[in-house]
Image (cartoon, rainbow, N blue to C red):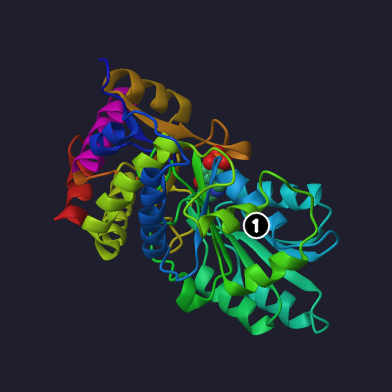
Amino acid sequence: MQDKLSLMIPGPTPVPETVLRAISRHTISHRSYEFETIFNRINKKLQWLHQTQSNVISITGSGTAAIEAGIINTLKSGDKVLCGDNGKFGERWVEVAHIYNLDIEVIRSPWGKALDPEAFRIALENDTTKLIKAVILTHSETSTGIINDLSSINHYIKSHGVALSIVDCVTSVGVCDIPIDTWGIDVVCSGSQKGYMMPPGLAFIAMSKNASEAQKRSDLPKFYLDLKYYQKTAIKNSNPFTPAVNLYFALDAALEMMHTEGLESIFKRHKRHSKAIQLAIKTMGLSLYAEEGHESPAVTTVAPIYVDAELVRTIIKERFNILLAGGQGQLNGKVFRIGHLGFICDRDIIATIAALEVTLKTMHPDRIHIGQAVAAAMSALV
Ligand SMILES: *Cc1c(COP(=O)(O)O)cnc(C)c1O
């Protein structure tokens, strides 16, 4: 059926009609009073969403551009960095750090396990000569469905006194609580196609005062991603280069919707939905790939025991128009992932679980008792 596809993947996420309509306006000049007004309004709302007094820089690009920008605007060639790696995205930031000749110490956890804050504490405490200039890590590791303990790790970074925190919050901004200023997180990166209820195309970087200080000393090569141009023009409510004008219309509308819902409600909604999905998955005799107690509120990675993950995805897509994500990297073909972030309501959760139940029933009639997983999900929604 046309136009009925339901995106239950961890990005791109569904886009509300209000936001779609905002995009479809005529494009205006980015050097106009009207654009400046929108830009100004957006920046205030971005600060609200990020719980910060600092400016949040928006650039054209996907989430990866934001993290690359965060790294190359605050560090110098040869700087020592700690990289947390427990999944596909953690791996990516190690690669970026390599490309820019940073001196990397990787703190690894096996896929499906959370990063160990103790490992960060020890590495940071041992660094008495303060060589470590930054800790780069992923908050919600979308490949495995793990949420890392950012609060504890950030606490150890603060105690170190010199190292900046550079955090991939692509599937946690607008999903769970990240009090940037209260915790003193230095660089927080995100992308529009995740918690923002927007199409892909914009990336966001929030930077603390310490990060801005480090920026002055940074010498890594950059031009389009050199944030000083964006900071300079932001004062005049403008961009250094042609921005994705229509995506700003979308952002304005999406942030307004988020503001109306309220941060607390947004966080609560994501928590409820992930809980509902977790209960349902277990009821169907499937397992969560994420270590218990560290499940991401944005995405659930299901490590099927008795089913072919790709076949599940094919059937649920063809019969129900519901798109689930496959596994990334070493999990390719071995798991499926359910995204439940952004513009997702209870109905989406119930429909997905019901469709999954029917799908599994057709594959393994004796393992599934129709209705039980839906009942389990609904018990978390009442
Ligand atoms: C989606 C995502 C990104 C960004 O990926 P892009 O394709 O560049 O937008 C980065 N980190 C995490 C954890 C993600 O889920």
Q: Position of residue 284 (x, y in %)?
A: 31, 41
- Does 362 lie within the magenta span? yes
Q: Position of residue 32 (x, y in %)?
A: 42, 42
Q: Quadrant of residue 188?
A: bottom right
Residue drawn at (77%, 67%) of the image: 217
Image quadrant, ligand 1: top right
Q: Is residue 346 left or right of residue 83?
A: left
Q: Nearer the viewer, residue 51 or 136?
A: 51
Q: Nearer the viewer, residue 75 or 333?
A: 75
The correct choice, above or below, for 190 with respect to 292 in the image is: above
Residue 214 visible in the current orientation: yes
**Image quadrant containing the C terminus:** bottom left
Q: Amino acid at mark 1?
A: Lys
State the extent of the magenta-drawn residues as a range.
Answer: 347-367
Residue drawn at (64%, 68%) of the image: 212
Residue 286 visible in the current orientation: no
- Helix, strand or loop under label 1: helix
Residue drawn at (54%, 37%) of the image: 242
Dominant secondary structure (helix, strand or loop) of the stretch shown in magenta:
helix
Q: Position of residue 15 (x, y in %)?
A: 32, 36
Q: Quadrant of residue 81?
A: bottom right
Q: Position of residue 300 (x, y in %)?
A: 41, 47
Q: Is residue 148 left or right of residue 42?
A: right
Q: Is residue 169 left or right of residue 348?
A: right
